[in-house]
Amino acid sequence: MAVKIRLKRMGKIRAPYYRIVVADSRTKRDGRVIEEIGIYHPTQEPSVIEVKSERAQYWLGVGAQPTEQVAALLKLTGDWGIFKGDKNAKSTVKIKEPKVPFVADEKKKPVLKPKAEKPVVKEEAPAAETTEADAEATEDKA
């Protein structure tokens, strides 16, 4: 059985993301897979590439052939260099910097003023009168 390491397309029509999978070469692009070994999100900035290096090394070692796209991704993560025996292989994937939380300037006065709560007044007396009037109206009709 010829085994390939390739991309399985997921996501919406114009928002694709991919899973890096090991599959039989005869199966469909999005068909049955043997194992999922990573993810690739090309639409995010910077692109997200995560590969389970240990599993990628195993499958490359037993003869799985990566497609051109996956080979390029494995070169970026350094897994291809490790497989070929390069001891200095490093990942060149850019890591997204953590988002800095927004801090409002407290010296400036707020644009929106908080609304004052209005006291809730319940008028029970008029409601009772209407029910009595309704009751009398129904008695007159009968």
Image (tube, rainbow, N blue to C red):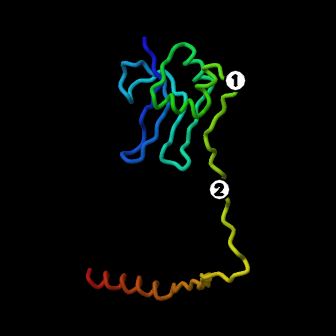
Residue type for callout 2: Lys
Tell me the element at label 1. Answer: loop
x and y, in percent, of residue 116 in the image = 62, 85
Front tag of 2 and 1: 1
Give the residue displayed 65% in from the left and 19% down from the top: 85
Tell me the element at label 2. Answer: loop
Image quarter in which the C terminus is found: bottom left
Residue 104: quadrant of the picture? bottom right
Q: Which residue is mark 1?
A: 87
Residue type for callout 1: Lys
Residue that extends furthest to the left in the rendered view of this protein: 141
Q: How many marks?
A: 2
Q: Is residue 99 above or below residue 38?
A: below
x and y, in percent, of residue 63 in the image = 52, 14
x and y, in percent, of residue 92 in the image = 62, 38
Q: Nearer the viewer, residue 124 or 50?
A: 50
Sooner in the amino-acid sequence: mark 2 or mark 1: 1
Give the residue displayed 43% in from the left and 14% down from the top: 2
Residue that extends furthest to the right in the rendered view of this protein: 107
Q: Nearer the viewer, residue 40 or 140?
A: 40
CA distance for labels 2 and 1: 34 Å
Give the residue displayed 56% in from the left and 86% down from the top: 121
Q: Nearer the viewer, residue 142 or 12?
A: 12
Q: Is residue 13 above or below residue 101?
A: above
Residue 52: quadrant of the picture? top right
Q: Which mark is residue 99?
A: 2
x and y, in percent, of residue 10 in the image = 42, 38
Q: Is residue 53 left or right of residue 18?
A: right
Image quarter in which the N terminus is found: top left
